Image (spheres, rainbow, N blue to C red):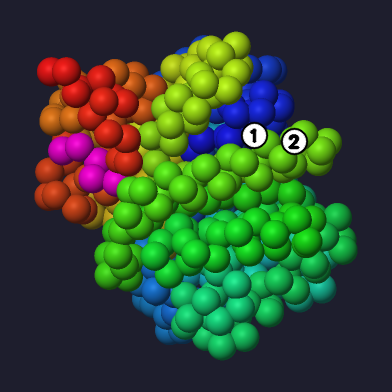
Amino acid sequence: MINLTRLYCDVAQPMDHLRYGRGHGAPATAAERRPIVVWNITRRCNLKCVHCYSDSTSAMYPGELDWDQCKAVIDDLADFKVPALLLSGGEPTIHPHFFELAEYATGKGLRLTLSTNGTLLDPERASRVKDIGFSYVGISLDGIGATHDHFRGVQGAYDKAVQAFRNCRAVGQKVGLRLTLSQHNIDDLDRILDLIEQEQIERVCFYHLVYSGRGSNLLEVPHEKTREAIDKILARTAQWAATGQPREVLTVDQPVDGPYLYMKLLGENPERAAKAMELLEWNGGGKNSSGTGISNIDTQGNVHPDQFWQELTLGNVKERPFSEIWTNRENATLAALRDRSQHMKGRCAGCRFLNVCGGGFRVRAMQMTGDLWAPDPSCYLNDEEIGLAAQ
């Protein structure tokens, strides 16, 4: 996860201590961080999104954790001192014990966030979410109007999502927009950035496409269009900061956004570029993400290196606590992920930004090539930029 507001604009951000080692409570190194846990509490969903990594639909799925098992997970995560717990799905607010589970988690001192499609977040539910103490609500929106409805598979989903932003703002709940960049919506980007301004949305996460679940059927955004999109996002981020209204703008699942941002800054503000590089090197990009700084518990209790990597299961919380699974050093793949530099192949192995990017997003490389250590095919930097042109 790359915080553009922090790196490009040098504006302090809420999670700087965890992401860049700055501020109270920062770990000594990024590799020593406890993981943020993405917990898919249910697979059931009222939409049918074309990019859904959990391949969810409106159906009951057997084997999901019962109430006592859910409480045991929360107890363990609180004792393990994870920095944040993100409730996801399916659509998490469909879970029959959603509010009780959230209240139990905040009662244990966990920093709680919500990833939702927003269609069920009416004024009453938004108010209850605020009262429970969610630090942040992320609402997925993947285009304007009919584009979003097509992406979500249900007509009217866009209007309900926009209303959910307003419902959260009305009760003072911090709310953000979550969008997956794809060929379906890349041409809507300017209008989406305008919407963020119009609706006074405080935070936005731009995800790069990962080929999990139904997302495996989508087409990759061409590299030149990805660069254009990042340029637009950076320009708008800088504009917001310059007018005294900075927003928390992040990109997710593509660590190469860090080196790209750094190269742009070199030509614009070398002093700020040096500061950004220092923070990027501390973070380490992909080498300290999946399997280290991020983790996933799926609806069946299986633990994965991240939410997109359902093929690799490290253990199950029904059998032993998450904390024991995560600290177990016997899984060879997990151990390799935490020391990945020596395993990288091809362009990644020789890249001058390897210690900053960390070799991209490993699960995407595996999904697209069949080789866990192959270069990330979605890297949009050319050989000259990464220092390979003369070799």
Query: With respect to residue 205, does 261 lie above or below?
Result: above
Q: Is residue 246 left or right of residue 8?
A: right
Instruction: Please provide percent x and percent y for residue 312.
Output: 24, 49
Q: Is residue 55 part of the magenta span, yes or no?
A: no
SS of the residue at dot 2?
Answer: helix
Question: Is any atom of residue 114 visible in this view?
Answer: yes
Instruction: Please provide percent x and percent y for residue 297.
Output: 41, 52
Question: Is any atom of residue 27 visible in this view?
Answer: no
Give the residue pinned by disc 2.
Answer: 241
The residue positioned 29% from the left and 46% from the top of the image is 378
Q: Is residue 96 left or right of residue 210?
A: right
SS of the residue at dot 1?
Answer: helix
The residue positioned 82% from the left and 60% from the top of the image is 169
Instruction: Please provide percent x and percent y for residue 97.
Output: 61, 68
Asked if disc 2 and disc 1 are in contact, CB closer than 8 Å, the reply is yes
> How many numbered badges does the structure rendering display?
2
- For disc 2, the neighbor class at 10 Å (few under 14, some 14 to 19, many from 20) is some
Name the residue at the bottom extreme.
Answer: 155
Q: Dividing the picture into quarters, in which one does residue 163 lie?
A: bottom right
Q: Main secondary structure of the magenta part?
A: loop
Q: Amino acid at mark 1?
A: Thr
Query: With respect to residue 300, does 43 lie above or below?
Result: below
Q: Dividing the picture into quarters, in which one does residue 291 lie?
A: top left
The mark closer to the camera, 2 or 1, is 2
The numbered dot on residue 5 is: 1
Q: Which residues are magenta?
A: 374-378
The residue positioned 74% from the left and 49% from the top of the image is 202
The numbered dot on residue 20 is: none
